[in-house]
Structures are given as structure tokens and as C-alpha cells.
Image (cartoon, rainbow, N blue to C red):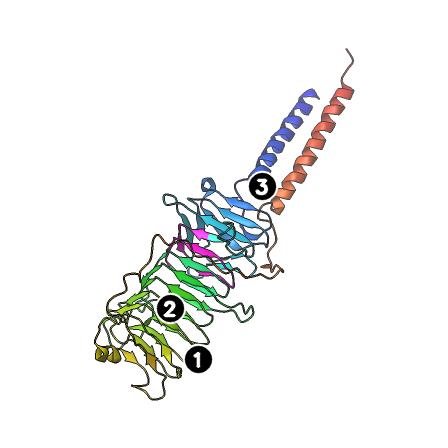
Amino acid sequence: MKKLYTGLFSILLLFTVLFVGTFLTIDGQEPVELKGIVSSDTTWTKANSPYNLTGNLAINTGVTLTIDPGVSVNLNHYFMRINGTLIARGTSNEKIFLNAATDGYLEFTALSAGWDSQTGKGSIIEKAVINCVLHTGGASVMIYDNVIKKGISLEGGSPVVSKNSISILSDDPVGTANAISISELFDHPIENKALIVDNTIFGSYTIAAVIVGRGSPTLERNIICNSYGYGHTAYGQAGIFIYGDSSPIIEQNTIKQSANGISLLEGNSYPTIINNNLEEISNYNLFLNKGVETTINASNNWWGTIDSAVIDQKIWDYSDDFDLGRVNYTPFLTQSNPYAVPDANAPIPTPTLVVSPTSSPSINRPAFFCLSWFGVGAVVMVVVFLVVGVWLLLRRKVNAPVK
């Protein structure tokens, strides 16, 4: 009987150790599954990298997900939705890698915490290699000093895209649609006041490197090059394409090596175009499409020449089609603007913070990121085995012969 009790106790002890170890792993550094809803502050560490999504993932409102330097995150075919705060700040030596398959993406909603440059708090992606599509969805996130390999969709709010290298290489022979798309969500009509500052944007885009559909964003000190169609007069792709009801400020940019420099399509657009360099453009520096009937102010720009007759030939407006508006380009710069390039020493731009809604949408997934049902079961079994073990020890003591 003594050997029987000893054997049973050993088995119970073994099970206890195994399940305690399993529970600590689930609640500690190695999450079982990266899907569902993160409902408490969480840090992803380099020691546990890479992190692989096995389903869609959401960060609750008021919750912060911190991604440490050197971490790789594979979204695969899923999306990660930020309703709270995402802090992903790599270093020059240890960048963060955000990867996804074609249909995987990272999304900030209007609920997410905007970046506050005064307090240094809020959502930020810095010094990362971003190989997944980004959607800001009305959020005022900071996207700073990254290498970006897929498109960015800025959908309202005051997001900042600054000092990034954006170069999208596509296997598609006709390229991808655009690098940056600026618009507003119709279900969350938050005015888009995006700041696109000090970036280098190169690639082959079938529409434009930057598309502005709505809002009043600012594009300043960027180098913008859309190589698709460059050198071929049959193509009409642009460095910047403006349409809809938008009033962008386009100031001190260098737009070059594109089929068209800046194109406008029908709508009530009133852009401010000033102190830019438009050079090495194969078709038109400024092109008004059908439906653009307003006068466009584009004075004080460098058009690649001081010959007004040549400038006229590089602008398509009322003088070419009487149904179009006019482009006012005088006075014009007599030489290239040396300040129309990214400034490495410029301070980090300050976004205009937008008050976010208070509700918290979910993605209809169970909240088991930090503690799964398996972990709960492990805790219950540990308690059961401990109780049984204590009961056997007490029974053995009671039945022991008195010496």
C-alpha cells in the first residue's frame, strides 16, 4: 500500500509540474495563438520572435501593444486592427519587420490613440521595414523613418508620414496603383489633414505615386517619382493625382521622371501648388482633365525652364481645351528650388489630434490571446490534482501505525 501511495503521488506531482509549466508559458512569453482580441497591455519581445497570426487580431480600446526592436511579425493572410495603441519603435541596428501575404494588412481605426508629439505617447511605427498594406481609417498615427514596400491608405484624421523611404516594386508588369492614397471614410467622415513630409517616393504606379481624393492634406519636401510611363508620351500617369472635393497644399516638393507631374480630375478641387520643382516630365507638368473648370493657382514653381513658351506647352488647360479652367503659373521660379527635397534635420511634424469615438468595435473573435481555454483548463486540473494529492497525504498520515 505504501508503494501504491508513493506511485500515485509521483504521478500527481508530474502532472502538476507539467500543467503549471504549460500555464506559465501561456500566460507569459509565448502566446498559444495570435488571433482574437487583446484586452490587456501586451509586449512582443525579440526573444519570442517571430510572431505569426493564425487569425484576425484586434487591440481593444485603451489597450497598448508594444513591439520591441528586432521583432518580426507575420500577418500572413489576416489583418491586425488597432482600436487602442500600437507602439512599434525599432532602432537603426534592430528594425521591426511587419510582413503580410497579398491580402494581409494592418489597420488603425478612428478609435486608436493618436500620436501626441508633446507627450511622446500614442500610436507610432518607427524604424520598421513595412511589407504590408497600412490603413489609418481616421487615426492620427505617426509613420516615421521606415522602409515601406507596400501601399498606405490614409482615410481621414491627421496621420503623419515622415522621413520614410517608399519604394514599391511589383511583379505585375504594369505596376501597382499608387504608393499613398489620401481619402476619407464615408461612415466616419473625419476630415483628412494628413502630413506627408520629407519622404522619398519612387516606383511604378499605374495611377500616381500619391492620390488625393478628399480632405486638405499637406505634401511638403518630398521627392516623388512615378517611373511608369516616363519617357513615353502615350502614358498619362502622374506623380500626384488630385480628384474629388480636396484642397491639398503641395509645397516644396520635387516631382520628376513621371509621365505627368500633377494631374487633376473633375470635382471641386482647390489645390495650393507653390515652390515645387517639376522637372524631367515626359508629357505635362500640370494636366487638367475633363471636368476641371476652376482656376488653378500654380505660381512660384520651377518648371524646368525660364522660357514661358515652353512652360505653356507643358501645361494642359483652357488654352488647349476651352471646357477647362486656367492655370495661373506666373510669376515662376527662375531656377530649381534647393529646399524642395527632404530635410533630414527637420523636426518631427506635429499632427492635429482628432477626438476619437468612445465605442469599441470587435472582430467577433473570442478573447483568448493571453489566456486560452486550454490555459483555464490547465489551472482547473492543477487545483484538482493538488487537492487529491493533499487528501492522499493526509489519509496516509491518519492510517499510519502509531510508534
Which of pointers 2 and 3 lies earlier in the amino acid sequence?
Answer: 3
> Under tag 3, what secondary structure?
helix
Q: What is the C-alpha distance between the residues marked 1 and 2?
A: 18 Å
The mark closer to the camera, 1 or 2, is 2
Specify whether residue 271 is in view.
yes
The residue located at (66%, 28%) in the rendering is 8
Q: What is the C-alpha distance between the residues marked 2 and 3?
A: 50 Å
Q: Position of residue 140 (x, y in %)?
A: 50, 59
Asked where in the image residue 161 lies, by quadrant, the reply is: bottom left
The mark closer to the camera, 2 or 3, is 2
Q: How many other residues sit within 10 Å of disc 2, few (<14), some (14-19) or many (≥20)?
A: many
Tell me the amino acid under the disc marked 1.
Gly
Magenta includes 131?
yes
Q: Residue beneath label 1, please? A: 267
Asked where in the image residue 310 lies, by quadrant, the reply is: bottom left
Q: How many other residues sit within 10 Å of disc 3, few (<14), some (14-19) or many (≥20)?
A: some
Above-or-below relation of 5 to 31:
above
Residue found farthest to the top? 403
Asked where in the image residue 218 lies, by quadrant, the reply is: bottom left
The mark closer to the camera, 3 or 1, is 1
Q: Residues in magenta?
A: 125-149
Which of pointers 3 and 1 lies earlier in the amino acid sequence?
Answer: 3
Q: Residue beneath label 2, please? A: 250
